[in-house]
Image: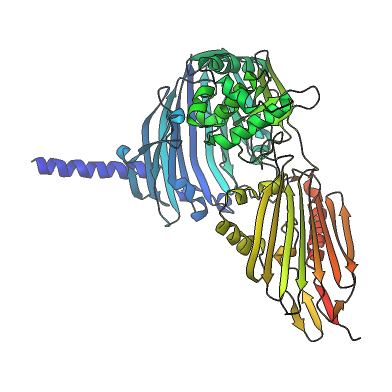
Amino acid sequence: MKAKLLTCTLIMLCHMGMLIAQDLPTLSDVPDSLLQGAHAVILDDETIVSHTGNKYRCQYRKTVAILNKKAESYQHLIFGYKENSEKLIDISAIITTADGELIKKVKKKEFSDVSMGDGYSIISDYRAKHYDYTSDDYPLIVHYDYTIESENTLMLPSWIPIDGHKISVLQSSYELYTDQDIRVKELNIESYPITRQKKHHYTLAHQPAVRSESYSPSIYEIFPMVYLSPTSFSYEGYEGQVETWDDYAKWIDTHFLQKKMNEMQIDESAVSDLVKSANSDIEKAQILYRYLQDNTRYISISTAEGGLNPMPPAKVDEVKYGDCKALSFYYMAMLRSQDIDAHYVEVHASSSDQRGLYPNYPAPVPGNHIIVCIPQETDSIWVDCTSDYNAFDYLGPFTDDRDVLLISADGGDLVRTPHYDEHHRSTDTISISWTEDDSYQLSAQSSHSGQYRGSHLHLLRSTPSDHEKYIREDWAKGLRIKNISQHSITDADTHDILSTTYDMEIDDPYEHAGDYLFLPMKERYQMDIPLLPKDGNRENDIVFNRTHQQELYIILSLPEPYELVAEIDETHESPYGQYSIKSTRISPREIMLEKLLKVNKGRYTPTEYHEIKSFFDKAKKTDITTITLTQTTN
C-alpha cells in the first residue's frame, strides 16, 4: 500500500512539473522579428514591488529563451541579498526545451548560499543564492522566480527591461504599489514602445534585439531604465529624508562618517613619524598616499555591493585591507591627524562608461565608488585610494571628467573631477640596426601616460619571465625574436609616466625580392587606429571619450649597399583627429620614420559615420605603407 501510494505521489509530482513547464511561454510564442539578431529572448519578465513604511516586498519572475552559447550567462542564477536585513523566499527555477518539455526542476536545496565577497568579515553580510546549470544544447529556456523582503528602502528595485545588446524582449513589466512620495529617474523611456497603465507601472513588449555598434554611447544612454527611491526611507536601521544632494550628503556624513571617525582612533604619533621629513601639507599627503599604496590591500566591493558603511580607520590600520570606502576613510583619518582637510567623494567609476551622478536625482545610483578630495586654494588634489599604482593627484580614466558628490559635515556639492585630455600619450622609439655579421639588433624605449599607462600596469606586477613572455607574444607581435638581452620597466612617482626599455636580437626584419628589401609594417610598427566596420544603417552617435595621442619613431640603420627608394611624407587631418607619417634622414646611413596619430574627443551624429570611417580607413591604409630599399652601385 505504501509503495503504491509513493508511486502515485511520484506520478502526480512529475505531472505537476510538466504542467508547470507547459504553463510557461515557449519559443513558439516568439515572432520571427524578435529572433533576428538575438542571442536570447526575454519571454516574460515581471517585477511587482509592494512598499509600505520602511519595508518593501519584491516578487520577481523571469523566463528567458537562450538561443546560443553567447547567452550562456543566463544559465548562471545568482540572487543577492543582505543578511540580517533582507530575506530571499520562494525561490524556484525550471529549465525546459524550446517547446516547453521539462529538463530540470531545481530543488531549493540545490541552491548554494555563498558570500558575495571573498570571505572577509567586512563584507560577510552580503550573500547570494546561487545555482549553475551547464548545457551546450541550445535553444533552451530558463525560468526562475523569487521574492525578496527588505528593510532597506533607500533604493527600491529598479526596472531594466533590456539586459544588453542582441537580447530581445517579448514582454517585461514593472509595478510599484506605494502610498509614499517616490523620486523617479527615467532613462531613455521615450525611445521605446513603453506603456504605462498607471503611476509607476511600466510595460515593454515586442522589442527587437538592439544591435551593438562600435564607439557607441554607454548602454545607460541607449537602453530604457527606471530608478525609484522614496523621499523618506530606512537603511540598516538609519532613517532619513532626502530631497536634494545636500540632504543625502549630510545623511551619509552624520550616520556613517562622523561617528566612525571617532570610534577607533589611529596612532597619530606613528603617522607623524611617517611625515616628519615633509616640508608642506602636500608633501605629507603624498607620503601618506605612498604608505597607503605600499601597506594596504584593496578588496573590490562597490558601494552598491558592500553597503554605505565604511570600516573604521583603526581597523584598516590593523588588518591592512579594505574596500574603496574603508581605504578612503583610512587615508582621510591619517590626513586629519596632521590637520589636513579631506573630503569623502562618491563617484560612478568606469573607464568605458563616463557618466556622472544625476544632478536632479540624489541617490546612491549610479555611484559605485569612493575617492578622496584634498581641497586647495587653486586646484584640488584628487586621490583614488584603491590603486596601487596611480600617481599622487591623478585619477585616470576610471574616475576622470564626471560629476561627483563631495561630502562634508556642511552638506554636499556636485563637482567635476579633472580631465586629462592632453595627458593620454604614448611615445615609442624603436631602433633597428644591422651589424657586419648579418645580425639585427632592436632597441626600444617607450613612455606611456594616462590611459596608455593604464594598459601597461600589469607589467609592474609581472615576474621577469612573465614580462619576457609579454614581449614575445604581445609587444613584439609580428617580429621574430632570437633572444632578449634586456628588459626593464620604471614608473615615475610624479604625474603618471610609465617607461619601458627593451633590447633584443631579431631575425632579418626585411623581405627580399631581387635588388629590393621591404620592411613591412608588422603589428609592432602600426598605430592603434580606430577600426569602424561597414554600417549602412548607423543608429547611435559615435563617441570618442578622450583625446589621446600616439607617437612612433622607427630608426633604421640601412644595411649596405641599400638605400631608401623614395621619401615618405603624408598627412591626413579632420575634425576627428590627425594622422601623419614622414621619413627623415638623420645620418648618412640612418633614416627615421615618424608616425603620429591623434584622436580627438568628441560626440558625432550617425550622419557623420561614413566621414569618420573614411578618415580612419585612409589613416590605416597609409599606416601599413611598406618601406622599400634598393641596392645601389658605387
Q: State the image quarter where residue 3 is shown.
A: top left
269 vs 24, nearest the viewer:
269
12 vs 160, nearest the viewer:
160
From the viewer's perspective, is 444 left or right of 462? right
618 vs 29, nearest the viewer:
618
Instruction: Identify the residue at horizontal 46%, vertical 30% (top origin).
Output: 123
Does 7 appear above or below 415? Answer: below
Q: How is the image coloured?
A: rainbow
Q: How many marks?
A: 0
Instruction: Identify the residue at horizontal 81%, vertical 66% (top origin).
Output: 555
**View extreme (left): residue:** 1
Instruction: Identify the residue at horizontal 69%, vertical 60% (top origin).
Output: 502
From the viewer's perspective, is 506 left or right of 78? right
Q: Give the x, y percent position of residue 545.
A: 74, 43
Q: Quadrant of the N terminus?
A: top left
Q: Is residue 563 visible?
A: yes
Does 567 appear above or below 246? Answer: below
Q: Give the x, y percent position of residue 251.
A: 59, 15
Q: Give the x, y percent position of residue 404.
A: 69, 27
309 vs 78, nearest the viewer:
309
Q: Is residue 542 visible?
A: no
From the viewer's perspective, is 523 left or right of 78? right
Does 107 appear above or below 306? Answer: below
Q: Quadrant of the C terminus?
A: bottom right
Q: Give the x, y percent position of residue 14.
A: 26, 45
Q: State the image quarter where residue 192 is shown.
A: top right
